[in-house]
Amino acid sequence: MNASDPFQTLYQKDKLKGESNAQATKEFAEHSPLRKKYPDDTKTLNPYYTFRGRTLSRIAFGCYRVGLESPEHESALELSLSQGFNVIDTSSNYGNGESESLIGKVLRKKIAKGELKREDVFLVTKAGYIQGRNLQIVTELEKQNKEFPEITYYSEGCYHCVHPDFLEDQLERSLKRLGLETVDVFLLHNPEYFLMDREKHNVPKEKAIEQYYERIKNAFRFLEQKRKEGKILYYGISSNTFPEDPQKYTATSLLRVLRIAKEVQNELGLEESGFAVVQFPANLLEIGFLEPQFEGKSLVEIIRENGLLPLINRPLNAISHSGSIFRLSYDPKKSGESILDLLKEELNGIYAQEATILSLLPAGSYKYTFRSVTEPYLDQFQNQDHLNQFLERTVIPIVQQLISQVETISGPAKQGEYIEILNRALPILEQYVFQKNVQDRTSVYEKILKYYPQYQGWNLSGIALHLLHSSLREGTVLLGMRKKTYVEDAVLSFGAALSAIRIEDWKRFEV
């Protein structure tokens, strides 16, 4: 193995044999705390459904923003598996590869304790992005004139590629980080970056679209070969543009992708296509997946008719019509002011911990701290987008310098401690911004109860998840359960039988 490989420290020492199967997932579900909590399918929702014989949880542990250095993330993932959530969704670029490595670590720990089998878990990963450590690799290869073909240079620091050569590299690295011989699902991750780039460069739409689907077809041929080798069970696409108006330049057409999958199946003489999974954003405010806009059918109808597995992402982080992120989180039992006070108290504790760490640095060796660049602006962030821009442009460059200084002066242990403090601070900042906009969420909550009165007393996130369960009937919602409390909240979303979905009501939830 190349000593200069930036992922070297993230690889597991060996690979676990096996893959999810029907018998193991069925037994896992039957003996889970989730199923014991919800045994009555008439009054509550069965937390599981079956897909091609496998018994899968309706909620997955979503690993976006999950990192290897966070004990909180590790314990939350362990708890989710112990509760009975047996679907995990990750990607090669989540946590710069650390997300997959954390999953591998947790699986090994629970298997060693006899609490889990590899066959119990349905694991999804993705590839396509070239960022961080992958960008280091690509840059070095380009210096040697060994670059991967068909890279989309979308923006500085963010490239994209779905060429078979790059997918081969990414799949092998993912399997090493996860420590698995087989991954259950391998997805092309937002291949529409190619279309976004072509549109930006004023390439005629028809030309770009033909190139786009030809690249997807070549990727599918490669993925069928990986199925034959036993490295993946199924494959698919995760695209933010599946639910979009099909006339948009950047839209990804599931109908056309299905035709391509059939062509590859026939070309290779296969009994069954490996194309089986689609992932897309959906929530109470982004309802394109329910609109009958695809030759008179909705995205969900097409998925059901073709026996595909739907995976929904961003269930609670909705993008409103104004373009801002709207957090579907509100508890009617708690006032906004009391929550803000608690969040400020938590932040003050974090600021104090930061001060203790930074006291180890020489006086005058730094000008700004995490506290000095966030505390004065807490009440000025208009929305999540505003906060994210501020973090990216102002806060992150400053704390990166501080992290480096702490390592130089005090060593890796103190650096890790400081990183953990900052990791805990970011979700609290986000929640603070959400709470400042609580009035909008109160309005949405009241509209929902008007049309779905059966949710009286539920919190908004529980309602949002249950309505997504109801809209899919069978499918999985990906939830960022980075804290144990988020895992516990997810369990509550099965507390009622499926609701009848009326898209005309959902349109009234707009903000």
Image (cartoon, helix red, strand yellow):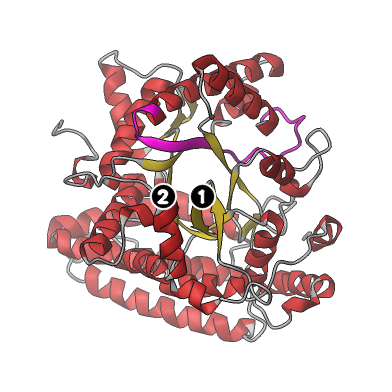
Among the 4 quarters of the image, the one containing residue 1: top left
Residue 28 % position (x, y) = 41, 64
Q: Which callout, 2 or 1, points at the residue further toward the start of the chain?
A: 2
Which one is in front, 130 or 224? Answer: 224
> For mark 2, what is the residue?
21
Query: From which residue to which does the magenta span run?
Result: 228-251
Quarter holding the C terminus is: bottom right
Which one is in front, 14 or 488? Answer: 14
SS at badge 1: loop
Whether tag 2 and tag 1 are in contact, CB under 8 A, the answer is: yes
Q: Height in image: 4 above or below 240?
A: above
In the picture, the disc for residue 53 is: 1
Q: Residue at x 48, y 23 (%)?
A: 219
SS at badge 2: loop
Q: Left of 327 or right of it: where is 447?
A: right
Q: Left of 245 or right of it: where is 265?
A: left
Q: Is the residue marked by circle 2 packed among few (<14), some (14-19), or many (20+) residues within 10 Å? A: some
**Residue type indicated by callout 1:** Gly
Q: Height in image: 67 above or below 277?
A: below
Residue 224 % position (x, y) = 45, 26
Q: Answer yes or no: is residue 63 visible.
A: no
Q: Height in image: 87 above or below 235?
A: below
Q: Height in image: 139 above or below 421?
A: above
